[in-house]
Amino acid sequence: MNMFGKVTLVTGATRGIGKAIAQRLHESGATVVVTGRNPQLLAGWTNLGVLAIPADVTNVTEVQALVAKVMAEYGRLDVVVNNAGITKDGLLMRMSDMDWQMVLETNLTGMFNVCREVIRPMLKQKEGKIVNISSVIGVIGNPGQTNYAASKAGVIGFSKALAKEVASRNILVNVVAPGYIATEMTQALTEEQRADIVKLIPLQRTGTGEDVASLVHFLVSDQNKYITGQTIHCDGGLVI
Ligand code: NDP
């Protein structure tokens, strides 16, 4: 699926799933812009000739500057993948205000900040594709992740509303809900916990960033002209 000429922004692309998505879209010919907070990891992208702009998605001023820079450089924005996200797990009884707020601020408000900023140029273009990365946890919940589940369920509701709001301008908004993907975010689990999770996955393995990238690639490509407002799981059958 050729993405030639499509200006594409991927948040949280310094590692993990976001990096795999950005790599796939770059290899498919898209003009990719990546963002994240870690300057060293962003420098790796610059070496590949990819525009890497440091930005914290929780900071409105930085998000405004990010989108302004993309528009100044390329004059359009065709695809946005809101992938930046964090976890701060803990049982509700002991969850600090800070852990609640940081997760909601990053996973939900961060996505809102980026969507609000990119929607104006997309409305003007009368064309665009947005994919927001949620999680199966936002659909089925998980003990110790009330903050994360709330943020990821929020992403789904937000995306349905936005899909309806902008459909008349040919802007498609979808959600990808990954299951268990082996990245730094899931590294903290013990081997035993990982084996227990794999037992629950019909395809009998954990996912990779590339598995998620394949789905995102399809959703943002010209092959997708009629799917919007959907939440598509990429989880090896974990949630059926
Ligand atoms: P990682 O922790 O490996 O990567 C997270 C990325 O988000 C990094 O690039 C990080 O960059 C970026 N990021 C975090 N906070 C901010 C911020 N405030 N501003 C800008 N960038 C930020 O996580 P994964 O790759 O595993 O997860 C990616 C997405 O997929 C997340 O939304 C996560 O919730 C979701 N997901 C992951 C699953 C999994 O099993 N791994 C399962 C389901 C969903 P930097 O530190 O440089 O800012």
Image (cartoon, grey):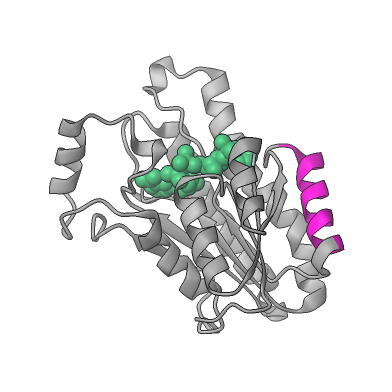
**Magenta region, mostly helix, strand or loop?**
helix
Q: Is residue 159 magenta?
A: no
What residue is rendered at 74% in x and 55% in y? 116
What residue is rendered at 75% in x and 70% in y? 122
What residue is rendered at 33% in x and 29% in y? 188
Residue 14: x percent and y percent? Answer: 56, 45
Res. 207 image quadrant: bottom left
Task: Identify whether 138 is placed above or below 217.
Answer: above
Q: Nearer the viewer, residue 88 or 156?
A: 88
Q: Is residue 30 visible?
A: yes
Residue 135: x percent and y percent? Answer: 41, 50
Task: Identify whether 125 is placed above or below 210.
Answer: below
Magenta segment, which residues? Answer: 59-72
Task: Identify whether 204 is placed above or below 144.
Answer: below
Question: In the rendered view, does 197 fall on the left or right side of 89?
Answer: left
Q: Nearer the viewer, residue 37 or 106?
A: 37
What residue is rendered at 57% in x and 60% in y? 159
Instruction: Tell which residue pokes out farthest to the front in this image.
Output: 47
Q: Nearer the viewer, residue 130 or 137?
A: 130
Q: Is residue 64 magenta?
A: yes
